[in-house]
Image (cartoon, coloured by chain):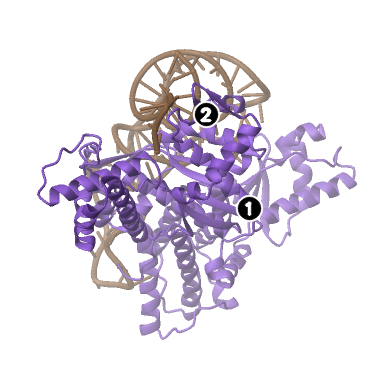
Amino acid sequence: MKKTIRQLILDIANKAFEDNKFNANTFAEFAIEEPKADAHGDLSTNFAMVNAKTQKMAPRKIAEILIRYIGNDHPVIEKTEIAGPGFINFFILPAAWYPVLNDIYEKDTQYGFSDMGKGQKIQVEFVSANPTGPLHVGHGRGAIVGDSTASLLSACGYDVHREYYINDAGKQIQMLGLSVFLRFQKLNGQTVDFPEDCYQGDYIHDIAKELKEEKGDWIYSVSKDEAVAFCSKFAADRMIIKIRNVLNTLGIEFDNWYSEQALVDSGKVESVINKFKDQQIIYEKDDALWFKTEDFGDEKDRVVVRNNGQATYFASDIAYHQDKLDRGFDRIIDVWGADHHGYIPRIRASITASGRNEKQFTVILTQLVNLLRKGVPVSMGKRSGQFITLQEVIDEVGKDAVRFIFLTRHYESPLDFDLAVAKQKTNDNPVYYVQYVHARISSIIKKARNENQITDISFDEKSVAMIREPEEIQLIKHLARYPETIAASAEYMEPHRLAFYLMDLAADFHAYYNKHRVLTEDSDLTAGRLYLILAVQKVIRNGLTLLGVSAPDVM
RNA sequence: GCGCCCGUAGCUCAGCUGGAUAGAGCGCCGGACUUCGAAUCCGUAGGCCGCAGGUUCGAAUCCUGCCGGGCGUACCA
């Protein structure tokens, strides 16, 4: 509808110029928007105001000319008016909204999709938590935001690739292996000294136990270094399996799990360092290798290889991001926790240093999550290893509620996650509010089938014409906004927009339901209303699906 | 100190990238189930949009400076 009105304005503006009513045929960017107040019509434009300069005319004068061209017998527009400083308000004929419903039936599960992305290859890398411990709620937020963003981009015609980068090389993994090795010894009754900087959590015991069950005391037959190395690999593999299982319960699956160790083994890290050394972007100082990140906007240069010969994670990250772009992605998106924001300039530096366009690289920073129970913070003591894991949170409140709560905030604002609230099946927890619409409609349709013998819900001119109540027209208008909601959510990579849209749509439906009966004595009216509510259900289902939330028929 | 994020109703949060009278849920108070699912609906009250300037026809939104909170600022990840 917005497109229709925009085109109409452009057409008549050009015609007005040809008729010498306007002074110029170039027009400034203008907006078509839905006014907040119903009294201001269905749609309005600031065309007259923003074009006061281009036309050298008063806004109201411009508006008057446009309105005269539209006339009184337009097939879509019921009436127009000039308001305030020069807004033009459009009132749309109710019947003009009906085609939206047909569109929904025709496109069905694809309704709202677009080809905005034109098949561009885009990679979303998210979670990428180190496999040294269980996921917590903060990881969960990144996981859900990343996954839903990927789904939205996919719905908008991007060729999306989901990837998890596994930090399975380096010192942390050695520590993980050592921790398991020590716990293994303890399991065998040996008294061992367990250092503070080893991983303390119970999951380390579990892995040691698994190791014993599977390999017995095999690790005693090799040297300690070999044993620890084996433990590292064994433990990392186990952790990744656990992490993957948790993410699967959230409905998240990756196209690829990318191993840092494999990247190192491939020689790509070394070759990238050499390349930058040749270009003198990497230089030697104090026996270490430094990247000239400061020349590319970072605060200072960063170490790539330490004076003990060990590469930093930054070294791998440089190679990893080069590799992403080498794989042909037009854009790469990294979803990180906000505590990593200081890392952005150096990664960006490595990308621009290689001659790439920094616009290909975007970071979504999700703010931290405060886990609460009835308003009191739940201890997240990391050192003790005693914290509530993501898995435990999912088990307690359910996957749909967890996902929806994370998606009803902008990812950039800090989030209080209250376990007690998240468990409630009330309107404190809007996921049920939205799902209830879906279940309710299923229930009505079931009843129509069983008691009213209605088997077919499809377009019929006579019955659709019975859709006249203001609440009904309101619902269709809302449905018409769905595609642009999807497009904006994808463009700005803000899935919360879709979540809020669904809550608003649900509110409109519940209000309608409480005021009007769908199943009535009048068969045409009933058929029309069924046609409407099934369309509502389709949109609710489509939206929930993109957010990774289920759309139940019964609750 | 410097950098990034946040500050909107008692609480939790939106505010469509500058538009008309700033919204929703929860909570408070008062109503609606012999009728398609009350996990619902209807109504009342509640605001110097952190503060102060600036940009313009017009600012919660953009710019500058303060104030408060979080995070970051390693040859750690």
Amino acid tagged 2: Leu
- Tell how many labels: 2
Amino acid tagged 1: Gly
Residue A480 in the figure: left or right of residue A65: left
Residue A525 in the figure: left or right of residue B76: right
Establish if A281 lies above or below A205.
Answer: above
Please give the name of the residue rendered at 59% of the width and 51% of the height, measured from the top-left corner. Answer: A42
Report x, y in % for residue A71. 76, 54
Establish if A179 lies above or below A467.
Answer: above
A151, A68: nearer the viewer: A151
- Viewer can see residue A430: no
Q: Which lettered chain is shown in brown? A: B
For label 1, the SS is loop
For label 2, the SS is strand
Q: Chain of mark 2?
A: A
Nearest to N terminus: mark 1 or mark 2: 2
Q: Chain of mark 1?
A: A
The residue carrying mark 1 is A328
Report x, y in % for residue A35. 57, 45
- As measured in the structure, the alpha-carbon distance from the residue carrying label 1 to the one carrying label 2 is 29 Å
Q: Quadrant of the N terminus of chain A?
A: bottom right
- Outermost residue to the bottom: A453
The residue carrying mark 2 is A289
B62, A63: nearer the viewer: B62
Q: Residues within 10 Å of mark 1 (few under 14, many from 20)?
A: few
Q: Quadrant of the C terminus of chain A?
A: bottom left
- The answer to which quarter of the image holds residue A410 is top left
Give the color of chain A as drawn: purple
- The answer to which quarter of the image holds residue A340 is top left
